[in-house]
């Protein structure tokens, strides 16, 4: 007998590519039934003890800025923590309280407010380009502008504002470093291309770009783009900035309206619970074959890896006949006994409770039971 569907993401294998807060993201996905893999495409290298950062902070306290641009929440918090550790926390806070503060998106805004400061303007698009347009339209000639960079740099803000006559003071609080386990990243792109992963979640543009670069290096980027186009692979990005490298590569990701991890999880849930999630219409109901389970209607089918492999091959054939030899080729192991394919088909039928889900074509093989 099949079992009741426990969660929207039951049977889904979700890959988390983030380094920071990956445990929180994984836990939220697992509570919804997902099986989570973790392969950070990049690591965050903190600079909270960096002598250069402290020297630049002292200079800023001595010559306060007219404008502060905060690009990331984690970077801003790290800067304040570094200032505290260097004995400059109170002075920096007093300086920033008298400075016009511009935030790149809601996460930066939240960090500013958590520090007891008030952002004067927030870029709702979460892009540095929107901030640049604002400042250039207002005019920055002769102004001192401090920019708290994110790990990938200043997105051209430094140069553009300096060219417009601003005195730019950059602050790099953390940088992106190479992945701790490059082979895990390489395996994740290969498995995503091969169909072993259902959904890939991204929380930063540099991380998304690094993962795509790994796919290109493994020679599977085209397969990933094709799987994403068919709906078999879902990419999810925390915001439009993170989504940009994916879209440039030809992958259209799921993006929440707000750039928060909670909103990202809800967007993934909405995708899998809505009509946008691809399913096959069979004589036994709507069928989805995910990474570790098959969903028939509102039921999870208790299938072994052999049963999943058989059902996936039948779904891929889209109602065409699949021979016993072809089914043997997808079964785990190296059996050449046609009886092994027959047993696997029988167990799929038993799990579904419907023999007509997999139909026998005499002397030819099997086909998925789809409406004529």
Image (spheres, rainbow, N blue to C red):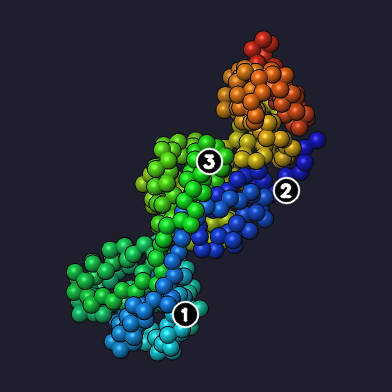
Residue 339: x %, y % from top left: 72, 19
Q: Quick check: marks 1 and 2 in contact, CB under 8 Å?
A: no
How many neighbours does mark 2 have within 10 angstroms: few (below 14), some (14-19), or many (20 or more)? few
Eyeballing the image, is 143 above or below 314? Answer: below
Residue 276 visible: no
Label 1, label 2: how many angstroms apart (C-alpha)? 42 Å
Q: Which residue extends farthest top?
A: 363
Residue 165: x %, y % from top left: 19, 74
Which secondary structure, mark 1?
Answer: helix
Name the N-terminal-most of marks 2 and 3: 2
According to the image, label 2 marks what residue?
6
How many neighbours does mark 3 have within 10 angstroms: few (below 14), some (14-19), or many (20 or more)? some
Which secondary structure, mark 3?
Answer: helix
Residue located 57% across and 28% down the image: 316
Quarter assignment of residue 72: bottom left
Label 2, label 3: how many angstroms apart (C-alpha)? 25 Å
Quarter assignment of residue 88: bottom left
Residue 193 visible: yes
Q: Looking at the image, is mark 2 or mark 3 nearer the viewer? A: 3
Horizontal arrangement in the rendering, residue 120 relative to residue 258 (left or right): left
Eyeballing the image, is 181 above or below 360? Answer: below
According to the image, label 1 marks what residue?
81
According to the image, label 3 marks what residue?
191
Label 1, label 3: how many angstroms apart (C-alpha)? 39 Å
Which secondary structure, mark 2?
Answer: loop
Q: Quick check: marks 2 and 3 in contact, CB under 8 Å?
A: no
Residue located 58% across and 55% down the image: 266
Residue located 61% across and 51% down the image: 36
Residue located 57% across and 56% down the image: 265
Horizontal arrangement in the rendering, residue 233 relative to residue 164 (left or right): right
């Amino acid at each position: 007998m099949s079992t009741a569907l426990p969660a929207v993401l039951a049977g889904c294998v979700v890959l988390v590519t983030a380094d920071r807060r990956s445990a929180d993201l994984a836990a939220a996905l697992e509570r919804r039934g997902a099986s989570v893999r973790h392969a950070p495409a990049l690591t965050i290298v903190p600079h909270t003890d960096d002598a250069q950062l402290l020297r630049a902070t002292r200079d800023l306290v001595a010559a306060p800025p007219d404008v502060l641009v905060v690009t990331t929440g984690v970077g801003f918090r790290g800067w304040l923590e570094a200032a505290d550790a260097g004995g400059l926390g109170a002075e920096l806070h007093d300086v920033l309280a008298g400075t016009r503060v511009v935030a790149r998106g809601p996460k930066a805004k939240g960090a500013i407010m958590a520090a007891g400061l008030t952002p004067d303007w927030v870029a709702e698009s979460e892009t540095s380009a929107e901030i640049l347009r604002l400042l250039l339209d207002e005019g920055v000639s002769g102004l001192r502008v401090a920019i708290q960079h994110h790990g990938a740099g200043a997105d051209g803000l430094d140069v553009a504002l300096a060219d417009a006559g601003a005195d730019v003071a950059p602050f790099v609080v953390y940088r992106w470093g190479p992945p701790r386990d490059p082979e895990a990243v390489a395996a994740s792109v290969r498995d995503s291309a091969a169909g072993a992963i259902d959904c890939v979640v991204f929380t930063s543009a540099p991380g998304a770009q690094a993962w795509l670069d790994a796919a290109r290096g493994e020679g599977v980027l085209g397969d990933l783009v094709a799987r994403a186009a068919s709906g078999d692979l879902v990419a999810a990005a925390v915001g439009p900035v993170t989504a940009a490298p994916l879209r440039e590569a030809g992958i259209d990701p799921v993006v929440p309206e707000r750039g928060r991890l909670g909103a990202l999880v809800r967007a993934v849930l909405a995708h899998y619970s809505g009509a946008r999630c691809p399913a096959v219409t069979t004589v036994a109901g709507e069928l989805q074959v995910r990474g570790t389970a098959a969903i028939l209607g509102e039921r999870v089918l208790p299938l072994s890896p052999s049963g999943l492999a058989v059902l996936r091959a039948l779904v891929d054939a889209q109602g065409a006949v699949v021979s016993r030899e072809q089914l043997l080729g997808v079964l785990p192991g190296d059996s050449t006994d046609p009886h092994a394919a027959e047993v696997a088909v029988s167990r799929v039928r038993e799990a579904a409770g419907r023999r007509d889900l997999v139909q026998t074509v005499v002397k030819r093989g099997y086909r998925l039971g789809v409406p004529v």
